[in-house]
Amino acid sequence: MGFIWSLIIGGIIGWLAGVITGRDVPGGVIGNIIAGFIGAWLGGLILGDWGPDIGGFAIIPAIIGSIILVLIVSFILGKVRKSSSE
């Protein structure tokens, strides 16, 4: 049950990062879960493990890390789309 809870929280974190940035995370639900997990890892590296902990994620660093990840992925995909259309 702990693993499923982590998947749900990771998906919510990824979705929330997409909502805050106003950009869709590629891959739908799976993309949101991946963005949540990688964003939590990135946020943990940058900010540490402070703030409330839910489902194994320090929420504040996880959301901030996910926002950074969504912005980076959006930037890279935007560059790829521009170069392929030229």
Image (cartoon, rainbow, N blue to C red):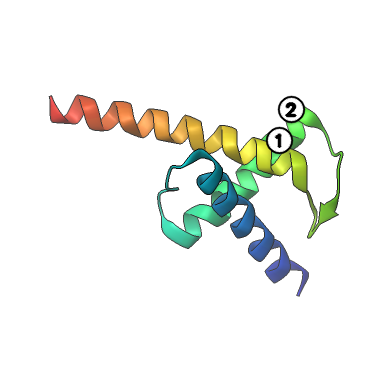
Q: Image point 68% across, 70% down: which residue?
A: 4
**Between 20 and 13, the one nearer to me in the picture:** 20
Q: Amino acid at mark 2?
A: Ile
On residue 46, which mark appears?
Answer: 2
Residue at the extreme left? 86
Q: Quadrant of residue 50?
A: top right
Question: Please, what secondary structure does the residue beneath circle 1 have?
Answer: helix
- Left or right: 41, with 48 as reference point: left
At mark 2, the secondary structure is helix
Can you give x and y, in whole percent of width and height, for residue 1 in the image?
Answer: 75, 75
| Residue at position x 61%, y 49% in the image | 36
Q: Residue furthest bottom?
A: 1
Residue 6 sits in quarter: bottom right
Are the residues tagged 2 and 1 within 8 Å (C-beta)? yes
Instruction: Identify the residue at horizontal 31%, vertical 26% (top origin).
Output: 79
Image quadrant where one finds the C terminus: top left
What residue lies at 53% left-to-right and 54% top-to-bottom?
32
Crowding near pointer 2: few (<14 within 10 Å), some, many (20+)?
few
Badge 1 local density, few (<14 within 10 Å), some, or many (20+)?
Answer: many
Residue 55: x and y in percent read 78, 60
Q: Is residue 73 above or below residue 55?
A: above
Would you place residue 49 above or below residue 31 in this image?
above
* Residue ID for mark 1: 43
Q: Amino acid at mark 1?
A: Gly
Q: Horizontal and vertical percent for residue 69?
A: 55, 35
